[in-house]
Amino acid sequence: MKAKHFVTLFFVVGLVFAITGMVSLAIGGTHADSSDYGNAGKQLIGNDSSIETLDVGEPAEMSVEGSPVGGEVTSPAGDTTVCVSIPAAAFHSDGFFPDCFFFSFYGGYITTTLSSDCCVSTPVHVPEGAVIYQVWMSAIDNSGSSDQSLRLFRVNKNTGTVDTMATVSTSGQSTSIGDFSDTSIDNPTVVYPDYAYYIGTCLRPNIHLYTVRVWYHPHTDATFKSIEIGD
């Protein structure tokens, strides 16, 4: 009988300790702090070499480069360069003399026999926020009396105002293809939808236009800093 009472008492005491322990865990727990992580290792998030250390519970801060200024987006132009190469076949008449020019399938150039008013144009597609930094033209200028000029334009969709961004002109006289350029670009940042972009030129006899290249720095919309989590 005494043994039975002893077993019963032992079971009750054990149950009380078990309940007390569970209650203590429920109401007396604490949040982990940075020391609980020890030297568990480090994690890097992002693609930038900048490093920031976070404490536990501290929100991550990320740096975003590039911001709108006066309606135009500034671009941190870096070393990355991209070229849009426009063939002579892309040009079409401005409508004044629609049949004034000739494009050679096997020569790859466009030219005319008229001394004036044979003008052509083509649209230019460059990504939003890009920074145009030079325009090149490949042509044979075998004319002893005239040169050929080519211009990059932008037109404002709200006002219709047209701005000349770059002007490239041939010079001299040669039977070989030459490269001509303009590296001083006005309003170089591409802004959509406020502006649309195109090239226009008036052809000249004995001048063959082959290609136009528009070089630009692509816009980096956002750069996220790397985050170091740990010690």
Image (tube, rainbow, N blue to C red):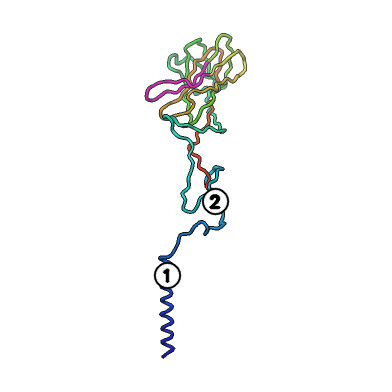
* Residue drawn at x 40%, y 24% as measured from the top left: 156
Task: Spot the residue most to the bottom.
Answer: 1
Residue at disc 2, secondary structure = strand
Q: Amino acid at mark 1?
A: Met
Residue 162 on the magenta segment? yes
Answer whether residue 211 is visible to the viewer in this image: no
Which residue lies at the image location 45% right of the left edge and 62% below the top edge?
Answer: 30
- In magenta segment, residue 50: no
Q: Residue at point 48% right, 59% down?
A: 32
**Is residue 181 in view from this perspective?**
yes
Q: Nearer the viewer, residue 220 or 115?
A: 220
Above or below: residue 182 compared with residue 47? above
List the single residue furthest toward the top: 145
User: Residue 11 at x, y = what percent?
Assistant: 42, 80
Counting residues from the start of the chain, the first of labels 1 and 2 encountered is 1
Magenta residues (range): 149-167
**Outermost residue toward the left in this view:** 158
**Quarter the N terminus occupies:** bottom left
User: Mark 1: few, some, or many residues within 10 Å (few <14, many ≥20)?
Assistant: few
| Contact (Cβ within 8 Å) of mark 1 with mark 2 | no
Q: Residue at x 41, y 76 (%)?
A: 16
Which x, y percent locates residue 17?
Answer: 43, 75
Is label 1 in a helix, a strand or a loop?
helix
Left or right, 111 with respect to 72, comes to: right
- Depth check: give the residue in front, 95 or 13: 13
Instruction: Please provide percent x and percent y for residue 91.
Output: 49, 21
Name the residue tied to disc 1.
22
Residue type, label 2:
Gln
Residue 34, disc: none
Magenta part mainly helix, strand or loop? strand
- Of the numbered discs in the image, which one, if any, rests on residue 43? 2
Mark 2 burial class by Cα count in 10 Å: few <14, some 14-19, many 20+: few
